[in-house]
Image (cartoon, rainbow, N blue to C red):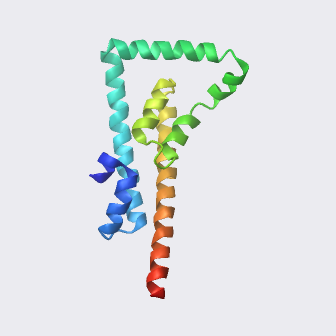
Amino acid sequence: MAQYTLGKKAAFPLGLIMGLNAWEIGIIVILSDFVLMAIINHMFDLSFEKFKWAMYLRERSTRIQARLSKRNWTAGLMKIGWLGPLIMTTIPFGGGVWTGISLARVMNLSSRQSTFAVGVGVILGCLIFILAALGILSIVEISEAGV
């Protein structure tokens, strides 16, 4: 439940307190984020079909992207657009599945591109948290052994 309400930043400490190891927590977090990603993608699909303001935002975003793609410096950024959601999802405390998918939708990425970018971001972000948890646990074990 902590994963769905507060994200990885709460799930890892809570899992460690409950006695799970970092890898078990990581697997649980990745699986729950993939479920959440499917639900959010479905919600976005439904909202864009039902709400006129959402369709307006999508059309406006497409027009702005078409204009930006004509400029030299922004055209290069547009080509690697899927990296934005990937980075946003990967960076600890920078965002997550909600932010990554929202950014992908605003950038008009295809469903396949947004799922790939956010999915890889989830895995990389979780690996960062696993490595941090393992590092903290090793420091705690060393300090306990020295006492």
| Residue found at x 32% / y 36% | 39
User: Which is nearer the eye, 88 or 122?
Assistant: 88
In the rendered view, would you say 43 is above or below 144?
above
Percent x, y of residue 83:
58, 37
In the rendered image, residue 20, in percent from the top left (x then y), is placed at 34, 68
Q: How many marks?
A: 0
Residue farthest to the left, as pictured: 1
Residue for point 62% across, 13% down: 67
Identify which residue is drawn at 38% across, 32% down: 41
Who's the residue at 30% across and 16% down the image? Answer: 50
Q: Position of residue 59 (x, y in %)?
A: 47, 13
**In which quadrant will I find the C terminus?**
bottom left
At which x and y percent is residue 30? Answer: 41, 52
User: Which residue reaches farthest front?
Assistant: 147
Q: Quadrant of residue 78?
A: top right
Above or below, comparing residue 68 to residue 140 in the picture: above
**In the rendered image, the vertical position of residue 90 relative to residue 77, given as above or below:** below
Residue 51 vs residue 74: left or right?
A: left
